[in-house]
Image (cartoon, rainbow, N blue to C red):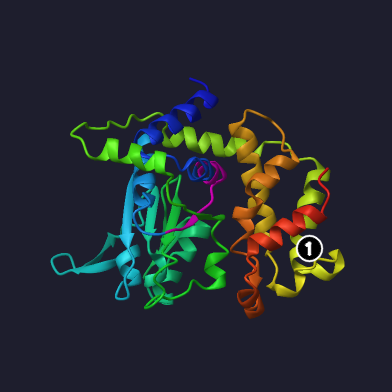
Amino acid sequence: MNKENKIIELKKEISKVIVGQEKIINKTIIAILAGGNLLLEGAPGLAKTLLVNTIAKSCSLEFSRIQFTPDLLPSDILGTKIFNQKTSEFITKKGPIFTNFLLADEINRAPPKTQSSLLEAMQEKQISILGDTFQLDKPFLVMATQNPIEQEGTYPLPEAQVDRFMMKLNVEYPSKKEEIEILNRMTTNEEIKINSVLSGKDILRYQREVKDIYVDDLIKEYLVSIIDASRNPKEYNLSLGKYIKWGASPRANIWTILGAKANAFIQDRDYVNADDIKEIIKDVLRHRIILNYESQIDGISPEDIIDEILKTIKSP
């Protein structure tokens, strides 16, 4: 089975369990192929945990879930060392982060010190436990969720950590038709079997092939102009520029290119076009463009800024 058919089969397996959410599924697959991490924002009960678990089963990979709470410690994520009195040696007890797919559920409920324990793992694919460094298994993906409704007792993610996420996806409620299908599937005795259609080796090979996708200099200049407009809105005469406090970081360029390459790869193309950039640019930028307080008063969102930038910058 070639890679295009395998990805189609992967989507079919996920669709056995997840009803609708096609954009979320596609973007999750893009993140896996690009080697990035995801931040999902949505109300409880929208199958975020089920999605990650299903993808892990479809890829024959290990899955761990951590429920973030105010009393969660870094050692609860990474692991710790325990002294063995018989051998007079310290034994490393590895935490749930030693997996392929890690779901950090309601990440904004844990204090900043615990949140930051994920930083090294997300960026370097390795962790440190009391001075010893451990490499994580590959592929490794962190998918974190946060609830936009309940803000009491939460700790907003620091900009440094938010920037480590390749994309931020907004998970929406299902349509009426999709909700009826959910009822049909989830209120019967029928057991849904998930077949493994990809392996870890397949994913690692695809990740290498994604990086070989060609990107023309015109596409790179187009993307860099978009990012630059978020930092220097006056130079581009953006009417909404007054609402921007901070523009996107250099990581935005890197992750957009990798995501665009992954999107082209899924469509069986060996080159990136402007549509690939437009397909993921909002997901890459919505958590990287920081707005001021005036934007909240006037009801301006990062998506509004991105829309104006895309209208201003001509695509090649």
The answer to which quarter of the image holds residue 211 is: top right
Determine whether, in the image, residue 87 is placed left or right of residue 269: left
Q: Which residues are magenta?
A: 29-42
Dot 1 falls on a residue whose secondary structure is helix
How many labels were placed on the picture?
1
Image quadrant in which you'd find residue 218: top right
Task: Judge left or right: residue 277 versus residue 191.
Answer: right
Name the residue: 38% across, 64% down. Answer: 106
In the picture, measured across the screen, residue 216 lies left or right of residue 128, that is right
Outermost residue to the top: 1
**Residue 173 vertical position relative to residue 9 in the rendered view, above or below:** below
- Residue 4: percent from the left, percent from the top? 54, 26
**Foreground of the two, 89 or 95:** 95
Query: Where does the C terminus fall, quadrant-wise?
Result: top right
For the question of whether residue 250 can be seen, the reply is yes
Residue under the image location 37 percent in, 78 percent down: 153
Reading the image, the residue beneath label 1 is: 229
Residue 49 is left or right of residue 277, and the answer is left
Instruction: Please say whether residue 79 is visible from this viewpoint.
Output: no
User: Looking at this rendering, what residue extends furthest in the left direction?
Assistant: 86
Q: Amino acid at mark 1?
A: Ala
Q: Residue 267's x, y, as percent?
A: 62, 30
* Residue 300 or residue 218, whichever sits in front: 300
Between 114 and 78, the residue placed more toward the observer is 114
Q: Position of residue 99 (x, y in %)?
A: 36, 50
